[in-house]
Image (tube, grey):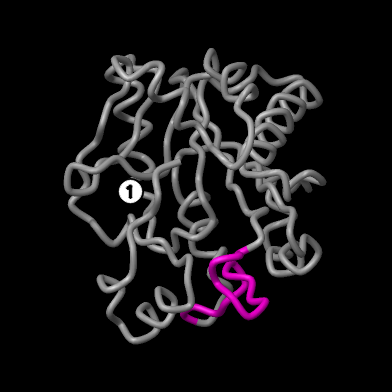
Amino acid sequence: MSEEPVSAAILLAAGTSSRMGAGRHKLLLPLAGRPLLQHCLEAILGSQARPLVIVLGHRAEEVRAALSDYAAHPAVEVVVNPAYAQGMSTSLRCGLQALLARAARLGEPPPASALIFLGDQPFISSRLIDRLIATWRSSGRRIVAPSYGGKRGNPVLFTADLFPELEQVEGDEGGRRVIERHRSELALVEVEERLAAYDVDTWEAYQAVLEGQPGQGQDNVPL
């Protein structure tokens, strides 16, 4: 049995997709024969990150149905954030609390860190996730993130001692202020796969993916 420290994963999938327009839910849009959200989910499950907490909110039952094939996976836990409309911070808090509650319920030690994912990154790879985890283990830094062309992106890994600070974040914000507060403890991993940063956040970005030209869309806004 490996004694290396464990990094969990939290997949934020609760947002309202307000920028997509026309009442569309971006995470449910079809991409290569399956809902967009499944691409990120499968990349996480193909990596070393365990367990995975998926936080739902907007149209939760529809999203849950789209993930039904993964519900029985022993490493997956799906939770619903009733306060999702109050911003990303509430989903992050919900995910962290669910992660710690799961460990207590199963009598397991809490994870030593957690990677925070946004559900609209369909091109993230298991290889990239494992690189971030390996960098955390070798560097001893408390925060690890990918750098796409010199620009910090997602997902972001935080060590467990930063969870209390993340739980104090408010509004429609992720861990940006926590990262700024601990900038000297941030390790950036330069990633050549720029496509991994692609954010399917608008109808135009989604159309660009379907047309095989995702470079014309937008890069993911850092957490």
| Nearest the eye: 32 or 174 | 174
Total numbered circles = 1
| Nearest the eye: 24 or 196 | 24
Residue at screen point 49% across, 64% down: 39
In the current view of this chain or complex, which residue is farthest to the bottom? 211
Please tell me whether mark 1 sits on a helix, a strand or a loop: helix
Q: Is residue 146 above or below residue 136?
A: below
| Quadrant of image for the C terminus | top left
Q: Is residue 31 above or below residue 51?
A: below
- Kind of residue at badge 1: Arg
Residue at screen point 69% across, 65% down: 69
Magenta residues?
A: 17-32
Residue at screen point 61% across, 43% down: 88
Q: Position of residue 196 (x, y in %)?
A: 32, 57
Q: Position of residue 153 (x, y in %)?
A: 34, 44
Queried whether the magenta region covers residue 54, the answer comes back as no
Queried whether the magenta region covers residue 18, the answer comes back as yes
Q: Which residue is mark 1?
A: 127
Q: Is residue 42 above or below residue 116?
A: below
Q: Position of residue 118 (x, y in %)?
A: 51, 50
Q: Residue 181 vs residue 14: left or right?
A: left
Residue at screen point 65% across, 42% down: 53
Question: Which secondary structure dominates the residues rendered in magenta?
Answer: loop
Q: Is residue 169 above or below residue 205?
A: above
| Nearest the eye: 87 or 125 | 87
Q: Residue 131 vs residue 177: left or right?
A: left
Q: Position of residue 96 (x, y in %)?
A: 66, 30
Q: Would you identify the image quadrant in which residue 29 lies? A: bottom right
Count residues near mark 1 (Cα–Cα under 10 Å), then give few for <14, some for 14-19, many for 20+. Answer: some
Q: Would you identify the image quadrant in which residue 10 lies? A: top right
| Nearest the eye: 179 or 143 | 179
